Amino acid sequence: MKISPFKIEEWMNMYEKGALYDLTTTCIKPLSIYELLELSGMQSIPIFERSLDYGSITGSERLKYAIQSLYTNQELKNITVTHGAIGANQLIFYSLLEPGDEVVCVVPAYQQHYSIPESIGANVKLYFLKEENNWLPDMEELSQVVTSKTKLLCLNNPNNPTGAVIPNWLLEEIAEFAKKNHVWVLSDEVYRGLNLIGHPYSTSIADLYERGISVGSMSKTYSLPGLRVGWVCAREDLINEINHQRQYNTISVSILDEYFASVALENRDKIAERNFDIMRSGIDIFTSWLANEELAKCIIPNGGTTAFVKYQKDMTSRNLCKRLQNRTGVALLPGETMEMEGYVRIGYCATALNHALNLFSEYLHS
Ligand SMILES: Cc1ncc(COP(=O)(O)O)c(C=O)c1O
């Protein structure tokens, strides 16, 4: 099976490790196991005594109960555990799509959402969000692209890279429209729980709409990307099909990873307290930098961990990021890797953000 190069992952593999100031990051300072245990007030780690068998094949009950508590309307049979959100997305596409199916992807978003369907032979249409709409889908525009021929609509809410959060009323309109057209909606919700305005958790598409598919993960909201634990929450028949596909590429997720993921979700309020401190401090630094930088424009994120900045410099985003990193050690993600030229993505929860943004400014003015 042929598939397009994954532009973000290729870029990160090349540039992230060599950076002095890594602003390509989408994580909120990943936790160590010791930090997790300290936050959770745990003295011992009983899992270390357990033999390392395969565990429960579709996810331990403990973890599934913890995941269930993130939703209002779901049972354990609506949940399956995967190797990260990346494993979840892939399994959904393999389970739902056939060559010739029509898929609409709201972009910019994670490239998996369109490149895997393309590789399966689906007819993929991209719907580009616009800055003048605050990076939110416009129902009139969306209804021109999504039709009764469409099988699947893919969204990312909160959005990476723009930090836009689809308000619940708009999500309801999308669900209503999808229902009329019998369209499945995959909402990649790996940043769910990180809204800076209003309730931290938006309504999940799975709780709104019977063909709504929610993808979640430990990587962003819970600061544990190294656990490689994600999940799908969806209608039982789709979960059954995913579990069938899943036997060929997952068997089970590591019982150690599942154990620590359960501990983290059971203590998510404490992780949230820590993470919102980092996010608020990052957004304050970013906002005051932006107010003083005439060569950068951006809609301030309402959630997630990234901001999407339009820069004024006569240079492609790839060249800008390459030269900026060579000269200053600051790594940013070129918008072109997310199909949006003229922008760069900034992870505002990064370490030494203030200094790195000042170096970026110096470069923009040079
Ligand atoms: C929107 C989105 N979906 C999925 C992923 C993959 O997440 P995971 O680490 O859980 O596999 C990422 C990672 O950056 C992401 O930004």
Image (cartoon, grey):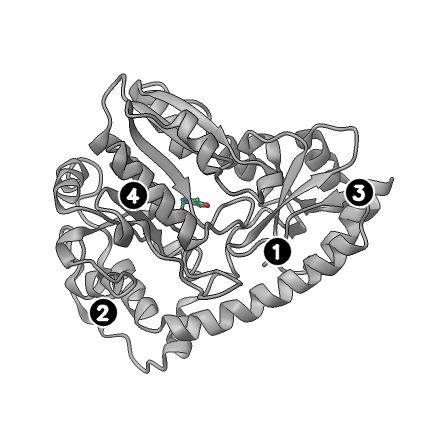
**Circle 1: residue type:** Tyr
Question: Does residue 237 appear in the picture of this structure?
Answer: yes
Image point (50%, 72%), residue name: 274
In the rendered image, which residue does mark 4 sit on? 88
Image point (27%, 31%), residue name: 181
> Residue 20: x, y in percent?
68, 51
Residue contact between numbered discs 3 and 4, judged by CB atoms under 8 Å: no
How far apart in space, not on screen, are marks 3 and 4 (Cα)? 39 Å
Whether the residue carrying mark 2 lies under 8 Å from ligand 1 is answered with: no
In the rendered image, which residue does mark 3 sit on? 295
How far apart in space, not on screen, are marks 4 and 1 (Cα)? 26 Å
How far apart in space, not on screen, are marks 2 and 3 (Cα)? 52 Å
How far apart in space, not on screen, are marks 1 and 3 (Cα)? 18 Å
**Circle 4: residue type:** Ala
Above or below, 267 relative to 157: below
Residue contact between numbered discs 1 and 2, judged by CB atoms under 8 Å: no
**Circle 2: residue type:** Ile
